[in-house]
Amino acid sequence: MARKRRKIAVADCETDPFRKGRTDIKPFLWGFYDGEVYLEFKTVEEFINYVSQLNIILYAHNGGKFDWFFILDYIEDFSSVTLINGRLAKFKIGNCEFRDSWNILPFPLAQYQKTKIDYDIMEREVRYKPENWREIRAYLRDDCIYLFDLVSAFVERFGVNLTIAGTSMKTWAKMMEIDPPKTNRLFYYNLKPYYYGGRVECFYNGIIERDFKVVDIKSAYPFAMLHYHPYGSKYYVSDELPNTIAYLERSFINLSAASLGAFPYRDSDNSLYFPNDGETREFKITGWEYIAAIENGCLQREEIKEVITFPETITFKEYIERFFNERAEAKRRGDKKTDLFCKLLMNSLYGKFGANPDEYEDFYITNSKFIQAAINDGGRLAGILGNKAFIGIKQDDAQKRFYNVATAASITGFVRAYLFNAIKSSDTPLYCDTDSIAAIKPGPPIGDKLGDWESEGEFSEGAIAGKKLYAFKGKDGKWKSRSKGVKLTHEEIYKVAKGVPIKYEPIAPTFSLKRGIVLTPRTVKRTI
């Protein structure tokens, strides 16, 4: 007899609005919705007294970086908690299990649906005016309903999972009627040096004063997953390259060479870049990248040291095509939920293959006065907020599952090679980021299929100040900009690109288990 799934519900809170210099943010209204009943609570205590009696799973969107910080004092000391990348992902108070829906739906709620509001009406001196109070209450209710709509649909289809990566792995394994792959620690650390992230590079810095275009790959990683990649735990080691393209594509190569921009390289500070200076280095690359370097004449003085080749391969063609086609149909009929779910399922699977369980810990929460005792007992202080401390304990090996980092390394290597081929075919590349290129005249042709290139716009001017720090002005007058870690206007990005540092003072505080609720000013400088 199947076990009955616990009922789910959602919560949200409204707080003092963010203002420059304000860190004393307090909630003044909580909303709760379980699909049938909507309730409001004016204090944290009222909210906790109610939900802690319910045998439910309660989600808040971005709760692990915001809402749940306001209820830490109600978590019983020595309770087990789950932290994921500093995010409070799961814990219990009474009968209620609290979760952060961002872990399964990592996008702003506004991408689905969100009511607009002027946050100024939430200031303490005006929030209780009748017209403002009505609008705030309606806004909170809408947020709860929209979130429940998303979460309940996701859980109904994919089950109760903690993360989107875990959901993707389970969905793929069930669809293909196979067990998830399993390797071991030695396998992981032998192949991990070949696993890198996406290619982000500035080919130009400063102000762009001529027309240019931006193109990107239509679903880059899902497209890569249509191809064959290394699989299984068995591999062969040689000092010679395979004699067939198929085996070369799914190989890993350790070589000494001068790479003219083709290969990834980790600097002494572990940052990733793509040297193009003619200097001989030792590289560890995928076969995809080796082939791209040869085809573009970007390899000199090569000396093969070691080649790892897998006899077994895998393609995710059935999985990807199912969700790609379903997403296309959802877009056609205006089904936002399915559109978002399919996008997440396609893009989240490969990363699970490369996960390192040695980085995982079990955590518990305790009063800060017990920190030293916890450390003496083998724990690690993972964070402290107020009078609550989070203690990490390494997991036993029996709890760990290594999937197959070779598969993940090959998929990411494919995308870097695919991007590099496009860069080399372009006239005057300006910038690239994982799956996109800005160039005076991009080389790859535009198409409609998965893996084709599509236009992101035509631009009349722009500014590049560093990786993930740019502003491009479209010919339609709209701006395409990025300023990772800070929120800069395009005027400010232009100043930085001209070499003028900008002092950035955030309005929204950072909610951190390590540092508490803080506002951290930064000086933003050109980095190229």
Image (tube, rainbow, N blue to C red):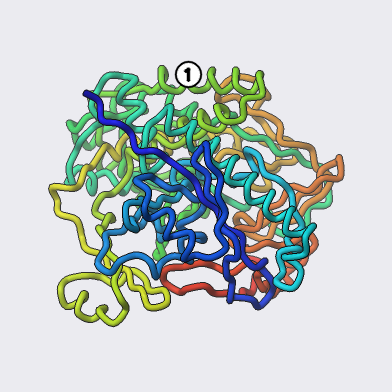
To which quarter of the image does residue 300 belong?
top left
Q: Along the line of sight, which residue is nearer the eye, 347 or 144?
A: 144
Q: Is residue 441 above or below residue 318?
A: below
Residue that appears at 55% across and 58% down: 41
Residue that appears at 55% across and 53% down: 12
Near mark 1 (Cα within 10 A), the count class, few <14, some 14-19 or many ≥20, is: some
To which quarter of the image does residue 408 belong?
top left
Q: Read off the residue under disc 1.
A: 321
Q: Is residue 157 left or right of residue 80?
A: right
Residue that appears at 17% across and 31% down: 234
To which quarter of the image does residue 419 belong?
top right
Q: Give the x, y percent position of residue 17.
A: 67, 66
User: Please, what secondary structure does the residue beneath circle 1 have?
Assistant: helix
Q: Is residue 485 above or below residue 125?
A: above
Identify residue type, mark 1: Glu
Q: Along the line of sight, which residue is nearer the eye, 130 or 492?
A: 130
Quarter of the image with the N terminus in it: top left
Quarter of the image with the C terminus in it: bottom right
Residue that appears at 26% across and 78% down: 371
Q: Along the line of sight, which residue is nearer the eye, 307 or 358?
A: 358
Q: Is residue 23 left or right of residue 120?
A: left
Q: Give the x, y percent position of residue 219.
A: 55, 30
* Res. 525 in view: no
